[in-house]
Image: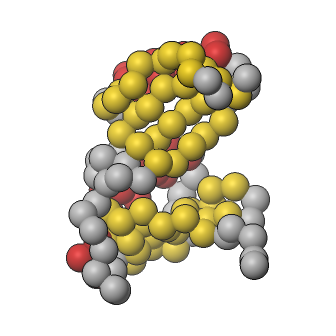
Amino acid sequence: MSDLSFVILYVSDVARAQKFYADLLSKPALEASPGFAMFPAAPGVMLGLWRADEVQPKATAPGGAEFCLTAENAAAVKATAEVWRANGIVIAQEPTRMDFGFTFVGLDPDGHRLRVFAPL
């Protein structure tokens, strides 16, 4: 089995999703076309944004995936939530302590969950 190297989110509008993730990740897409965009997500891991109506075999509706970002501590989680809220990102779960750490969840334009957490 190979290592995880790619995560793909199905989106309704690639240009909109591309702008959202370029702003969120503070980096431009490495590759972009009307139906697909690709970003470096972590060393050796890419994030792809694929227009849902072009996916073969046919995909389910956009949304429903969760993309997780690790923060240094609870204060960094809270600060990130405030920055995202100020930038118009919908916060689906306010910063809170859970079994695995301190976390919050934002939503991208297609409803994919963006979890930021500081592990225990």
Identify the residue shown where x is 61% and y is 24%.
99
Residue 56 locus on image (x, y percent): 34, 86
Q: In the picture shown, does residue 2 fall above or below 96?
A: below
- The residue nearer to you, when weighing 25 against 1, is 1
Quadrant of image for the N terminus: bottom right
In this rendering, position of residue 44 left or right of residue 77: right
- The residue nearer to you, when weighing 12 against 112, is 112
Residue 105 locus on image (x, y percent): 44, 32
Res 34 seen here: no
In this rendering, position of residue 115 left or right of residue 53: right
Q: In the picture shown, does residue 13 fall above or below 51?
A: above
Q: Residue furthest front?
A: 99
In this rendering, position of residue 56 left or right of residue 81: left
Quadrant of image for the C terminus: top right
Residue 70 locus on image (x, y percent): 66, 36
Identify the residue shown where x is 46% and y is 41%.
114
Q: In the picture shown, does residue 60 fall above or below 21?
A: below
Residue 57 locus on image (x, y percent): 33, 86
- The residue nearer to you, when weighing 98 against 11, is 98
